[in-house]
Image (tube, coloured by chain):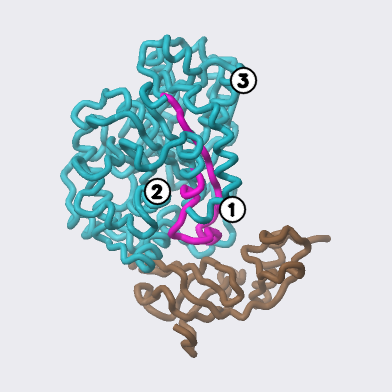
Chain colours: A cyan, B brown
Amino acid sequence: MSRVPQSHLDAAAVNRPLRGRVAIAGAATYGCGEAPGMDDMTLLVRAAHAAVADAGLTMQDIDGLATCSVNASMWTMPVIEHLGINPTYVDGTMIGGSSFIAHLLPAMRALEAGQCKAVLVCYGSAQRSATFGRKEGVAARRFLDPQPYEHPYEPVLPVAAYALAAARHMHEFGTTREQLAEVAVAARAWAQKNPEAFMRDPLTIEDVLSARPIASPLGVRDCCLVTDGGGAIVLTRAERARDLPRPPVYVLGNATAIWNRQISCMPDLTTTAAAQSGAQAFAMAGLKAADMDMAQVYDAFTINTILFLEDLGFCAKGEGGAFVAAGGIAPGGRLAVNTNGGGLSCVHPGMYGIFALIEAVRQLRGETGARQLSKHRTAVVHGNGGTLSSQSTAVLGTAETL
Amino acid sequence: MHLSAQTHYQAELDAGRFCLQHCPQCQNHVFTPRELCPHCGASPLRWVRASGLGTVYSATTIARKADAGGNYNVALIDLDEGVRMMSRVEGVAPEAVHIGQRVQAHVAHKDGRGLVLFQPAVQGGAE
């Protein structure tokens, strides 16, 4: 936390008047897991349609759009065609998997200024089923988004970058492979309570440790799923959300921080820019980690969860391994983390951030069935993009947190 | 004609020379190559020969099928000049590369292009 300048916390506190002024009025997923015959746009449009209906609105009410794609750099344009909307506010910012969480604050400003009345944040990817798949995408991006100081060494990105961070965390703090495995086992235990989760078979620490090696110290069970899926939320001003059918989920804080693109340019592999985005989001919300009833964090790999719990302030730097040990983040543990099963066991169609947001919304509304938390007033949602590159944190709350 | 920093770096490597940039204003070394000093914003940066001596900051063994060449190492190396780079440590089993290990760079050629690789330093230095 020491690397976050006071000026940045002051800048975040300036956003305090926006605290709770905007709410998530609708949320939906579509086609999570395997969706053969689908494409990115179909999954997005289906999820968008369901989220708009969930908000008690029609597509003609949508006058703001935030979306992006791994493959298409001008993605907002075909999305506008497919949805048949004519927005007065458009955001196509693409910073990887954290994008949809990073889309919140600019949308809040636009809503508060009166530039638009309802913003749709949406994503879809048929990464698992598409014929133009992950392999081709990685090959194409070598030309479109070159990393000439890493690619010649064939690091198998993104997993090699996270493996390097995990190895360094183990070296500095004594974090163990068993503690990394605890993250995957906890995610699976939550997934078993979620009918939408893609992988629900029992999973033990031993299963994770003996799984096929990918990039040491990470094996295949330390890595997120490759699934299909679409997700969308609808944002409106708080006053309007209160007139809509669903319980409003208020955005209390949001901030985004980026310190690097390439893992080799990351200043310290054991501290991510979540230390900055988290501190800023909490400063805007006027809350802290200890006030959170749950954490929905971007678990692309098991090390992510440990890094983000530390950087967001749930424990001190280096103590993340001990925090997750002995079922610390599993059902019944000290903190509810990734209650849908996360990117490790529920859904991960290339960019996971929107699904972390949707799970927080569902928990805060009290509609998650067997996995519903008894305390569900506050949530921190954290997104990650690139190779520990972009970090965006949102603090959400129910009406009683206003 | 001004060459891009990437083109200049690669041309030096192709000629067998491993070069870094150095900022004449704040005296920091700079890697990866770029147009402006990331510490103080100064330009232009000066090209200097790298010592090639460094310490492994982190390392991973990438699993690869034996018929595709087998497992290999990818590492982040902190050069003695104070900059970090991705590379591979070869000349030792990939699993044997460890954090804190002293390593020495050399320029290899792959498909006619220069590439910085490392091997364990002969004189261990301060390990």
Between residue A242 and residue B37, name the one nearer to us. A242
Location of residue A320 by image quarter: bottom left
Picture quadrant where residue A319 is located: bottom left
Expressed as whole percent of the image width and height from the top left, the position of residue A188 reads 23, 43
Q: Secondary structure at mark 3?
A: helix
Mark 1, residues whose alpha carbon is within 10 Å: few (<14), some, or many (≥20)? few
Q: Chain of mark 1?
A: A
Q: Is residue A51 left or right of residue A344?
A: right
**Mark 2: which amino acid?**
Gly
Dot 1 or dot 3, earlier in sequence = 3
Earlier in the chain: of badge 2 and badge 1, it is 1
The residue indicated by pointer 1 is A146
- Per the image, the residue denoted by label 3 is A113
| Residue found 49% across the figure and 87% down from its top | B125
Query: Circle 3: is it few (<14), some (14-19), or many (20+) Cα within 10 Å?
Result: few
For mark 2, name the chain. Answer: A
Label 1 with label 3: CB-CB less than 8 Å: no
- Camera-near label (1 vs 3) is 3
Q: What amino acid does circle 1 point to?
A: Pro
- Whether callout 2 and callout 1 share a subunit is answered yes
Using a 10 Å C-alpha cutoff, classify the residue at mark 2 as few (fewer than 14 neighbours), some (14 to 19) or many (20 or more).
Answer: some
| C-alpha span from label 2 to label 1 | 34 Å
- For the record, the magenta segment spans A250-277
Q: Residue at x 54, y 25 (%)?
A: A108
For disc 2, the marked residue is A313
